[in-house]
Amino acid sequence: MKRWLMRLNAHRAFGDIGALLTGAMLPLAFAPFGLAPLAILSPAILFWLWIELAPGRSFWRGWLYGLGMFGIGVSWVQISIHQFGLPVLAFSVTVTVLFIAFLALYPALLGYLVNRLFSGAQGGVRFFMLLPASWTLMEWLRSWLLTGFPWLNLGYSQIDSPLAGIAPVLGVYGVSFAVVLSAGTLCYAGAYPQRLRCLVLLIPLWGGAWLANRIAWTESSGAEPIEVALIQGNIPQTLKWLPAKYQATLDRYLALSAPHWGIDLMIWPETAIPAFYHPDQPLIQALQAQVESTGTDLLIGVPSMGESGKTYYNSVVRIGSTASFYHKRHLVPFGEYMPLQPIVGRLLNFLEIPMADFSAGSDAQSLLRVADQPVGISICYEDAFGEEVIDTLPHATLLVNVSNDAWFGDSIAPHQHLEMARMRALETGRYLLRATNTGISAVIDRRGTIVARSPQFEAHALIAQATPYHGATPYVRFGNAPVVVALIFMLGLGATLEGIKRQVR
């Protein structure tokens, strides 16, 4: 088998095309397609294509794999750049291609390092330890380097599979490790048929994960379920910030909300009000009167100005006699702030992106309290970072996310984003209430199951119930640290075992 693989890998075009197509197959494992087994099969094929390959060649195939993976999986960024930045096709396509080419460096570096540092490792240590640990560490690195981009981390694809049971214990990176370990086992069994019996190792992995999903890590706080209304205005992004459309936007949100005053909690999405918050605004005063007369608590996404008047925030405000704020902490580079502002700040004016110079909120913000419950709030893609969402826990009994996925049109991005929100609910053992501008708004229970969801691209008021929970999952208590430490230890142990094996030879 080994000799056959070496001869096959010698046909560079075959292996290169295979790497590209295999990477392009991977996004089908994620929402909206949901073909979760491909998240195992795709890396398994890549590992097979890396066997007995020189480090430089492994880099190239890893990069091709990344081009396919991110080229299909996140090409939706072009929509935002073209429609809401500079509407020149050559510009938006070029920026998107460069972005994808950069992301493709992650699997490329993985292939190079594994085949450079562990060139002689082709046995079980490689497939059961070195590759799973290094792949997962690479995902973790991608989640924070240069502010982070955790899209297409393998663990998200398993939200509806038995492996999801690992999420409350070890988070999404624990699930990713289980996926890559399964891929490594599958590759090892395929490349070395005499080792086919190694597939039995997957039984305790998958069985244990399934059993873990039966555990109730958190419990009801004892409070009655609260009735919630998530108001989805469906305002096109091209019209959202036009002054001439301001009143029509407010009228739509008020009309959608009108039948539901008296409910426990109402939520308007990210920047639902396309103007700076001010307590003397007629709209704010009218909403305060409604809150006081009906007893409904109201959360609204709105830009807000700092006390100095020189900074502004992407915020969620609790409307009441005394307003309470949450200011977004993790901003989107180039969309909400400009990195290296003194050098490239003029690009903001060139692209004409509205509200593109926000300030980051403090890491030490008090929890907002609504419907007599402390809630943990995230704005837009903040819910892609589990380590940040758990900052509000275990004190928060509910999670709230407000988003505006209209930036990405009718693409796969909103579906991927919803899948990530589901993982946050599962990791934390909390209901998550997700209010969006154009969809997909949803109420997600503590097991990551969608209780209710809105149609996309329709003005809609989503009505459902949510139960407050308390307690802490292991992931809430310890975050990503146990996984990262274990992965580093595994790499060290694997390298040591390979060193001993070489000395014995």
Image (tube, rainbow, N blue to C red):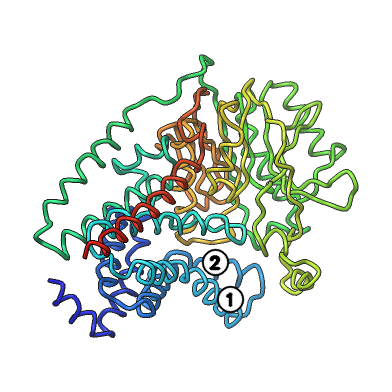
| Lateral position of residue 285 relative to residue 373, left or right | right
Q: Which residue is mark 2?
A: 77
The image position of residue 412, as x and y in percent, is 45, 59
Q: Residues within 10 Å of mark 1 (few under 14, many from 20)?
A: some
In terms of secondary structure, where does tag 2 sit?
A: helix
Residue 95 numbered tag: 1
Q: Is residue 31 visible?
A: no
- Whether tag 2 and tag 1 are in contact, CB under 8 A, the answer is yes
The image position of residue 427, as x and y in percent, is 46, 37
Q: Looking at the picture, which amino acid does disc 1 mark?
A: Val
| Lateral position of residue 169 relative to residue 1, left or right | right
Quick one: 87 or 109, which is closer to the camera? 109
Point 69% across, 30% down: residue = 368
The image position of residue 212, as x and y in percent, is 32, 32
Disc with the residue nearer the chain's start (2 vs 1)? 2
In terms of secondary structure, where does tag 1 sit?
A: helix
Q: Which corner quadrant holds the N terminus? A: bottom left
| Lateral position of residue 109 relative to residue 272, left or right | left
